[in-house]
Image (tube, rainbow, N blue to C red):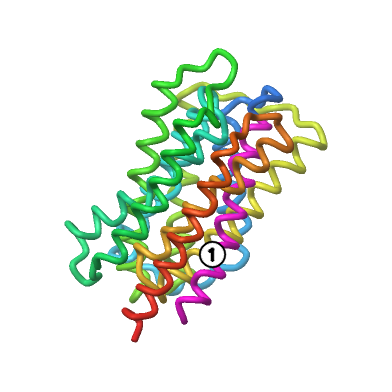
Amino acid sequence: MSAYAGLRNIIIIGSLYGFHGLINRSLLIDGINEVFLVTARISLVAFFLAFYCLKDFINEINVNYFLKGSLTGVLAILAPGWTFIYALKNISSGLNSIFISTIPLFTVIWVFFFYKDEKITKLKILSVLIGLAGLILLFFSGVTGISGEGNILIGGILALVGVQGLALSNITNRKHSQYIPAKVYLFTQWIVGSFISIILFLILGGNFEVMTSSVIFRLLGLVFIDIASYSLFFYTIKRVSASFTTLVDYVVPVVGITAGYILLNEIVSNVFFVTLILIFISLYLAVIDESENLH
């Protein structure tokens, strides 16, 4: 896969994830219980993936594949799934997107310490820092805030826990996807995430929600986005570097903030356009760096 094809996939994935946070927040605003929401979403994804993956999973699964898939499932699906949904009760979808956009920086840090097969170049670091600078500028411009009676400290801590899980999962996905069959690895992650989520649902005393057609439609929308975006992400990270693929998280806030402004009346500052320029520069430098490394 060329770096430009990877960038195309990154933009698609980032756009889908941007709407994912927005839909999650809209359901919380409508009073849907967060315990039910995260459990239903993850379990439905696992259910629909079974139609595509279950046969290969049964035929090819072994203890090694299961353990590695379970680890990534906890990091990439369970941890962010539960922490981000609670974070959105305390902070805006825009601010949550800002936290998510720090994933590239943490991914580069964890790659440096734990994944020596991937080279961290000066251009790659510059690309990550330029994008992050734009998002920090956006944050301090007052574009984001807390929701209702939310606690910004609690929301921020929860978001950061999810961020670390996703950053580390970029490394495990990149490393293990090279030899574990795709359907086996993908389904293991979601089935483990679903199983643990159901246990948490029961422990926390979750209740089944009476859902309107609007809620059902949005919930299924989340499931579609999860399946489409995660499958494309998995396909992409298998072929290009983890630190390049994770730049998807610079696209997320652009979509999240724009959609939050249009659909949820959240605040947008003029600095947002400066951030856009910096993110475009960041992605351009990342493509140059990845092209050189692929050759």
Q: Residue at x 51, y 69 (%)?
A: 7
Q: Magenta stretch?
A: 1-27
> Callout 1 environment at 10 Å: few (<14), some (14 to 19), or many (20+)?
some
User: Toward which corner of the image does residue 72 lie, by quadrant?
Assistant: bottom left
Secondary element under disc 1, as helix, strand or loop, is helix
Given residues 15 and 128, the one toward you in this image is 128
Find residue 1 and report its horizontal and vertical position in percent: 46, 81
Q: Residue at x 51, y 59 (%)?
A: 280
Q: Please count the marks in the image.
A: 1
User: Toward which corner of the image does residue 20 lie, by quadrant?
Assistant: top right
Residue 180 magenta-drawn? Answer: no
Q: Residue at x 48, y 57 (%)?
A: 248
Find residue 202 and report its horizontal and vertical position in percent: 50, 28
Given residues 294 and 238, the one toward you in this image is 294
Vertical placement of residue 289 versus 136, above or below: below
Mark 1 is on which residue type? Ser
Task: Decide if residue 224 is on the left or right side of residue 190.
Answer: right
Say whether residue 50 is visible: no
Farthest-out residue, right: 213
Residue 5 magenta-drawn? Answer: yes
Find residue 203 and report its horizontal and vertical position in percent: 45, 25
Given residues 64 and 174, the one toward you in this image is 174
Vertical placement of residue 99 versus 2, above or below: above
Q: Main secondary structure of the magenta part?
A: helix
Find residue 103 and report its horizontal and vertical position in percent: 38, 49
Q: Quadrant of the C terminus?
A: bottom left
**What residue would you read off at disc 1?**
231
